[in-house]
Image (tube, helix red, strand yellow):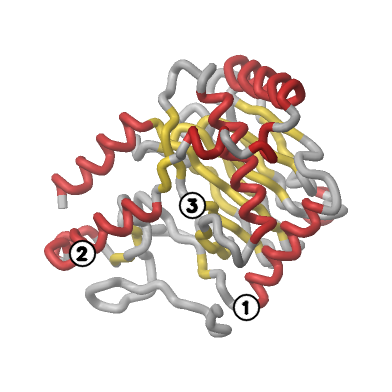
Amino acid sequence: MYRTEKKVSKCEVCDTIDNLLVCGACRLSYYCGRDHQKSDWDNHQQICKQRTEQSWSDLNFENVLKDTSLNKHCEKSSKLTEYIVECMNKYGICVLDNFFCEPRAGDILNEVKSLRSQGAFTDGQLVSQPATTGKVRGDQILWLEKNDKHPYITSFIERLDSIVMDCAKKLKQYQIGGRTKAMIACYPGNGTGYMRHIDNPNEDGRCLTTIYYLNKNWNTQTDGGLLRIFPEVFNQVADIEPKFDRLLFFWSDRRMPHEVLPTYKERYAITVWYFDTEERARAIRRVQNTT
């Protein structure tokens, strides 16, 4: 059972709650600056290692492929994989609508709303550096792994894992072997967004960003909340409406800067990042060696 009061993130050393940065390895401990992060390393390193092993879930290809419920439509799945791979290779972006369809998509949304009503969400934090001017991001988030308490969110993660693993065999530039927990995000509709940023500017291992939108009857003219991507290789932006049951893929690195425009209605999404195994291993070693 989640506590109904909102959990406040604070520095592990001095309890400051402003301009926090998050540990780049476990993403669960916060600090007001690099000095306090370094001073706490002796206490934090063992916990960090355990959290990292638990939080960044290695995909088990064999187990998922044995799940016939995820692979019973082989021909359809094959065409879907080909479409995603083709789009990613050509554009670095792929959009799939009606990913689950009703009633399953609605069941996922209901689980997400239930979690938020229980006070399980916290303010989103930056990974690489603290915000120095203004509000960089205005979402509230919850990290969640597959579990029996949330069967519909779990079914989404399982289906996504299966699709990404099929695509990984043909995306030769990466060796995809792991992912983050699912980050469930809600923009509360008070005009906040997320300033232009790159998901993985510092080679932390993330190579593929996937976002699943859960917003019924969304109208960007009145509700805002558009995701605007600035592909490095094109001279125009890609505007993605956060429509209900829409799944989006794009590269996580510097090729795809993006922003969430101000949002004036509750906006829900589930994001999962998939790792390149070699880059992720280097990133973990780098964090351990420099702190």
Residue 284, percent across and down?
26, 43
Residue type of the residue flagged with mark 1: Gln
Q: Mark 1 or 2 closer to N-term? A: 2
Name the residue tied to disc 2: 44
Q: Which mark is residue 99?
A: none
Up/down of 169 relative to 203, above or below: above
**How far apart are the alpha carbons under marks 1 and 2?**
29 Å
**How far apart are the alpha carbons under marks 1 and 3?**
20 Å
Is residue 35 at least partly visible in the picture? yes
Q: Mark 1 or 3 closer to N-term? A: 1
Residue type of the residue flagged with mark 3: Lys
Quadrant in which residue 20 is drawn: bottom left
Quadrant where the N terminus is found in the figure: bottom right
- Measuring 57% from the left and 65% from the top, which residue is drawn there? 140
Q: Nearer the viewer, residue 201 or 56?
A: 56
Name the residue tied to disc 3: 181
Is residue 135 at least partly visible in the picture? no
Label 2: how many Cα within 10 Å (few below 14, some 14–19, many 20+): some
Q: Nearer the viewer, residue 216 or 137?
A: 216
**How far apart are the alpha carbons under marks 3 and 2?**
21 Å
The secondary element bearing badge 2 is classed as: helix
The secondary element bearing badge 1 is classed as: loop
Q: Which mark is residue 118?
A: 1
Residue 247, percent across and down?
69, 39
Quadrant in which residue 133 is drawn: bottom left
- In the rendered structure, are the residues bearing label 1 and label 3 in contact, judged by CB atoms less than 8 Å apart? no
Indicate left or right for 281 with 2 as reference: left
- Measuring 46% from the left and 16% from the top, which residue is drawn there? 172
Q: How many numbered dots are placed on residues in this image?
A: 3
Indicate left or right for 106 with 67 as reference: right
Q: Mark 3 or 2 closer to N-term? A: 2
